[in-house]
Image: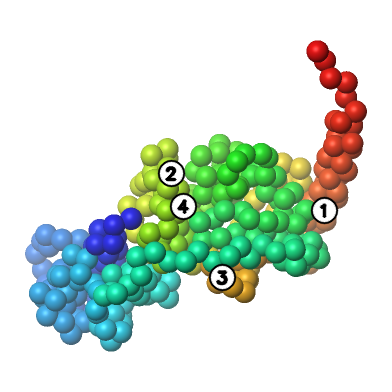
């Protein structure tokens, strides 16, 4: 992801969604040649010169002070996630910004797996690239479609955009797609030189028209908490609440838990999921015990 192109696309897309009326400007009749605010209107509202803001929107964001970034964020009515993304982009083009960032050591230790296994609800560990790094038995059961083999770790974005089973699993597949693209956009903004993230974005852009269309919108979201309705093939429909908890050592690797309100059909669904998970585990153990004893044919 090119720094300047990303900055330009992000600022232009945020500017295009704000009407003069929303920005508090007086209504002026007649046709406007641009959608949303003009550059000079953003500059005026942010207290900047038109030339300075134009340079920033062309990607020359490095060196912008915190007060300038705050003024732009306020004028463009950025939410907390978008504001954080703007700061990430500015940091990445600042003079002296590191061109390569050290990759943190893997936080998936034996103790982390013990924590997962001690939980009585579905729990998974995921990174900003949306790789599924670890899970407890209930987490594997909830996302059973993602875990069958492959050299690459299971990945939520590949599943949602490339696996046709995802449309049946998610009650609102469009919502899932929008969220995952926005999460990947935030991840790429934090470290645009992350080769694995860039490769994933490139792969999905080539293989999925939906992804490339959503990517062009420049929406940003930090994955933290929310609610989803899913249709599990073994237990049926469940309305679940998810929460993310950052792991020590890397704030962008999180444990995600899934819960349901007590006494609801969804809570009953999680109980059924636990029973199904145990059955699947016993079947796998039985298969593993039988497989070495099978006769080999010449």
Question: Which is more N-terminal, label 2 or label 1?
Answer: 2
Q: Nearer the viewer, mark 4 or mark 2?
A: 4
Q: Check whether the beta carbons of the residues at disc 3 and disc 4 lie within 8 A of each other.
A: no
Query: Which residue does the numbered mark 1 point to in the structure image?
Result: 274
Question: Which is more N-terminal, label 1 or label 3?
Answer: 3
Quadrant for residue 63, please give it. Answer: bottom left
| Residue in the image at 42% along x and 38% along y | 207
Question: Which quadrant of the rendered structure holds the N terminus?
Answer: bottom left
Q: Check whether the beta carbons of the residues at disc 4 and disc 2 lie within 8 A of each other.
A: no
Report, in whole angstroms, how far the alpha carbon at label 3 lies from the one at label 1: 30 Å
For the residue carrying disc 4, how many other residues have a C-alpha within 10 Å: few (<14), some (14-19), or many (20+)?
Answer: few
Question: Which is more N-terminal, label 2 or label 4?
Answer: 4
Query: Which residue does the numbered mark 3 point to in the structure image?
Result: 250
* SS type, badge 1: helix
Q: Position of residue 109 (x, y in %)?
A: 70, 64
Instruction: Identify the disc placed on residue 83.
Output: none
Query: Which residue does the numbered mark 4 point to in the structure image?
Result: 196
Quadrant for residue 16, please give it. Answer: bottom left
- Residue 203 as seen in the image, left or right of residue 141: left
For the residue carrying disc 1, how many other residues have a C-alpha within 10 Å: few (<14), some (14-19), or many (20+)?
Answer: many
Question: Which is more N-terminal, label 1 or label 4?
Answer: 4
């Amino acid at each position: 992801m090119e720094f300047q192109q990303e900055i330009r696309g992000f600022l232009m897309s945020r500017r295009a969604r704000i009407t003069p009326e929303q920005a508090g400007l007086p209504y002026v009749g007649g046709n406007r040649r641009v959608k949303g605010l003009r550059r000079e209107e953003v500059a005026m509202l942010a207290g900047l010169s038109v030339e300075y803001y134009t340079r920033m929107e062309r990607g020359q964001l490095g060196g912008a002070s915190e007060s300038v970034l705050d003024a732009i964020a306020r004028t463009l009515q950025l939410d907390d996630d978008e504001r954080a993304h703007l700061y990430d982009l500015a940091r990445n083009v600042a003079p002296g910004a590191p061109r390569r960032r050290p990759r943190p050591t893997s936080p998936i230790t034996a103790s982390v797996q013990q924590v997962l296994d001690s939980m009585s609800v579905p729990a998974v560990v995921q990174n900003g690239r949306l790789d599924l790094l670890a899970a407890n038995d209930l987490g594997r059961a909830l996302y059973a479609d993602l875990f069958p083999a492959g050299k690459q770790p299971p990945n939520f974005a590949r599943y949602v955009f490339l696996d046709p089973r995802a449309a049946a699993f998610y009650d609102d597949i469009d919502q899932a797609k929008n969220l995952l693209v926005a999460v990947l956009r935030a991840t790429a903004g934090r470290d645009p030189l992350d080769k694995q993230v860039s490769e994933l974005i490139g792969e999905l852009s080539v293989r999925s028209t939906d992804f490339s269309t959503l990517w062009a919108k420049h929406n940003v979201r930090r994955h933290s908490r929310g609610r989803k309705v899913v249709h599990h093939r073994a237990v049926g429909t469940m309305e679940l609440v998810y929460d993310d908890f950052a792991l020590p050592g890397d704030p962008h690797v999180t444990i995600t838990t899934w819960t349901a309100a007590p006494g609801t059909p969804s809570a009953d669904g999680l109980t059924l999921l636990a029973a199904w998970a145990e059955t699947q585990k016993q079947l796998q153990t039985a298969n593993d015990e039988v497989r070495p004893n099978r006769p080999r044919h010449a």
